[in-house]
Amino acid sequence: MTKTASEILNNPFLNKGTAFTKEERQALGLTGTLPSKVQTIDEQATQAYAQFKSKPSRLEQRIFLMNLFNENRTLFFHLMDEHVVEFMPIVYDPVVADSIEQYNELFLDPQNAAFVSVDAPEDIEATLKNAADGRDIRLVVVTDAEGILGMGDWGVNGVDIAIGKLMVYTAAAGIDPSQVLPVSIDAGTNNQKLLDDPLYLGNRHKRVSGEQYYDVIDKFVAAEQQLFPDSLLHFEDFGRDNAQVILDKYKDQIATFNDDIQGTGMVVLAGILGALNISKESIKDQKILSFGAGTAGMGIANQILDELMQAGLTEEEAKQHFYAVDKQGLLFDDTEGLTPAQKAFTRKRSEFSNADELTNLEAVVKAVHPTVMIGTSTQPGTFTESIIKEMAAHTERPIIFPLSNPTKLAEAKAEDLIKWTDGRALVATGIPADDVEYKGVTYQIGQGNNALMYPGLGFGLIASTAKVLNAETLSAACHALGGIVDTSKPGAAVLPPVAKITEFSEKLAEVVAQSVIDQKLNKEPIADAKQAVADMKWVPEYRAISK
Ligand SMILES: NC(=O)c1ccc[n+]([C@@H]2O[C@H](COP(=O)([O-])OP(=O)(O)OC[C@H]3O[C@@H](n4cnc5c(N)ncnc54)[C@H](O)[C@@H]3O)[C@@H](O)[C@H]2O)c1
Ligand SMILES: O=C(O)C[C@H](O)C(=O)O
Ligand SMILES: [Mn+2]
């Protein structure tokens, strides 16, 4: 196929900009379309980084990076490789939240995403085909944006989270960026602000639900599988009522996972195992309070439940370790409006002398004395000083993970948790947190974000051609990070640092691939898990292109 100069220069998967050599310029018909100097990718990266640094705000920095991404994926990822700790919060959480809120004002480029419209189910196949544009898609991140982080319904704007998640996949695990496809399922929006906004770019009507909605999801999954049979399908930020239903429907049929349920369950269990490694306590001695018993909260509870059962407890015994708290307070078996996932984790009123008073977090903490408290409530500042001090009065090393994103929704700040507990809390936060200096010790704060897990998990599943993802593989992955954190130092983090994300994503991918192969869940024969992972890894270097 012959490509014109503009087809090459405007294709971010092919473009090398000033790095096209003299010979390439000649062979590809690019002679004279670029300044004469031929640059190395490192020279380009140095220039681009200086431009990035010159931007006055994090949102401006993001806009710059997204433009670079639009123009030249190889250079973007080369640069991100060098600055992963600095770029993660810009291209992903938390700054991605700002760009989602301002998607319509900032829109310039669809970023090779597929926009599936609930109003045109007959176009689903063409939509995916057109967006893929002949690329060999191995990984799809899809969102319907009903539950974007903790910010609720953002309609078509939510596509940015799918794009951001995929950027992290490539930076962390090395998935080839030409083999990924972000998908927005535009089911309408119940966000009145968007419906009233003349600039809104999505379908201007309320969300469709019920049969019509599930029909579209079905058609989408079928088309996705038919067009990209070797792909993994990652669901992100669906609403609480749909996320688990969709996962249950497809998880035994295809290679798929829900990141908010399973990715989050994995990172929290890994974080708790890291914390217990520091405190030298057993998971069997923990009382776990989930504050915000929604998609993430119950995904976390189920992953820990699985761990407790593997440690030898029966399901009934294991469930006794959990206290789920939602809007209604502590969830009892007779609480109104329980979700199916919550029903498995309720308590009995007869267990408490003051059950009717357990309608808020403070009362529950007083009554239960949790040793682990996880926040996925979307309610900022709810882990107050008095609640944390009450918790810390009854346990030596309280494990406290305020995970609600973005920044403005976190249940607490790491620094406060360290101070309020006089340095005893073992903390992880949803977004990156600075080190905390307290009484001469530097406390490193783990990032309890599913971004630590899903790249390695997804990469391992794709590399091993997994048919499905099951509990055994999830559990193996949760344990894969053990040993990566040096817990001997005072103030050690409960999870490995983002600076090492490529290293531990590779380890995770290998463990996942091995688990798939051990269970004979691979579609294609794989001789060696490690080799399969190594072979699939894409590195951000320019390659020869044919005209
Ligand atoms: N750090 C991570 O990796 C990670 C992963 C997934 C989700 N999250 C965060 O967790 C939060 C929840 O996400 P989700 O997908 O589970 O959303 P969700 O809507 O499914 O769940 C939120 C839950 O919080 C409950 N809630 C609301 N107000 C409450 C209150 N006042 N007290 C107690 N509970 C209350 C809701 O009823 C709901 O059950 C979001 O902020 C999201 O960003 C973080
Ligand atoms: O996107 C994130 O930062 C993590 C998580 O998936 C969330 O929904 O908050
Ligand atoms: Mn999410």
Image (cartoon, rainbow, N blue to C red):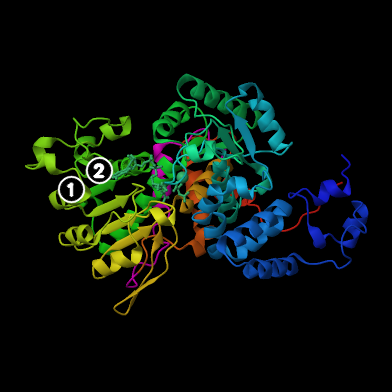
Q: Classify mark 2 as within 8 Å of ligand 1 or not, answering yes or no.
A: yes
Residue assigned mark 2: 325
SS assignment at label 1: helix
Gap in angstroms between the C-alphas marked 1 and 2: 8 Å
Q: Residue at x 40, y 51 (%)?
A: 267
The residues colored magenta run 464-491
Amino acid type for the residue under numbered disc 1: Val
524 left or right of 485 in image: right
181 left or right of 547 in image: left
Amino acid type for the residue under numbered disc 2: Val
Which dot marks residue 364?
1
- Toward the viewer: 208 or 140? 208
Q: Residues within 10 Å of mark 2 (few under 14, many from 20)?
A: many
Q: Earlier in the sequence, mark 1 or mark 2?
A: 2
Relative to 281, residue 332 above or below? above
Asked if the residues shown at circle 1 and circle 2 are in contact, with their CB atoms under 8 angstroms apart, the answer is yes
